[in-house]
Image (cartoon, rainbow, N blue to C red):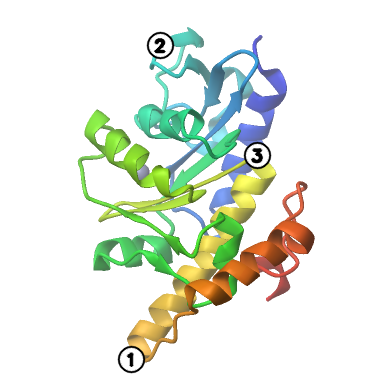
Amino acid sequence: MMMKTAREQIVAYCSRMAADGLTLGTAGNISIYDPELHCMAISPSGIPYSETDPKDVVIMDLDGNIVEGDRKPSSEYALHSVFYKADIGACAVVHTHSMYCTTLACMGEPLRAVHYAIAEAGTDIIPLVPYHTFGTPELAQAASEALQTKSRGLILANHGMCASGDSLKSAYGLALTMEWCAQVQWRCLSAGKMNVLTGEEMAVAMEHYKTYGQKSDGTHPRGYSSV
Ligand SMILES: [Zn+2]
């Protein structure tokens, strides 16, 4: 069985998503990329997380061909692929319709630097990808263009969000941070006042993340886990 550990990790993290407030039902999917195999393992389409077994995870190349697996892959496999083709060092992607990121997505709002914790995404603004039908090459193409900003995360208009990282722990941690920041931004917008950090302030925060804050094990002393 190819990518056995990745398959097991995907099943384990998918089953955590609902409890962590990142999804309802099966609206979300996770992939892990192996740069040596040039393949990704991706969660299957439409199987409840509680019933998903590592053998249900599908192995695909980045052109959308199934390399190993009997199940239908997540319909968003092309969306996942563009993260691995982008020059952002992604080895895992979490895509979900979490409440607050999706709320911003439906307001047509990117995730702004209301709180410095978004520096974890390597950017001072997490771009809003224009709306395209879910599961289409057009959506993947629009996401690919937004990734030229080098952001590790994306907000998908009228849809949801994506977070990537050099490991699944890191991608999942960014998804949690983005969801927390989105809730803060939504609360600010609801209250009618929002102070966005300047590019200069965010550049300093990002430097701090590189040097002290962001750990390869996916823990976030300055981000979500500290609140
Ligand atoms: Zn989706």
Q: Residue at x 67, y 38 (%)?
A: 167
Q: Residue at x 34, y 29 (%)?
A: 75
Mark 1 Cα-neighbour bin, 10 Å: few <14, some 14–19, many ≥20: few
Q: Which residue is mark 3?
A: 166
Q: Tell me which label, 2 or 3, sits earlier in the chain.
A: 2
Relative image position of residue 141 (x, y in whole percent): 29, 34
Q: Which of the two marks, 1 or 3, is nearer to us in this view?
A: 3
Secondary structure beneath dot 1 equals: loop
The amino acid marked with disc number 3 is Asp
Mark 3 Cα-neighbour bin, 10 Å: few <14, some 14–19, many ≥20: some
Secondary structure beneath dot 2 equals: loop
Q: Say whether residue 76 is visible.
A: yes
Marks 2 and 3, Cα distance to the nearest angstrom?
A: 23 Å
Q: In which quadrant of the rendered image does the C terminus lie?
A: bottom right
- Does residue 182 appear left or right of residue 37 in this picture? left
* Nearest to the observer: residue 65 or residue 213: 213
* Nearest to the observer: residue 69 or residue 152: 152
Q: Residue at x 63, y 25 (%)?
A: 7
The amino acid marked with disc number 2 is Asn
Q: Which residue is mark 2?
A: 65
Q: Residue at x 53, y 53 (%)?
A: 18
Q: In which quadrant of the rendered image does the N terminus lie?
A: top right
Q: Which residue is mark 1?
A: 192
Seen in the picture, residue 167 relative to 201 is either above or below; the reply is: above
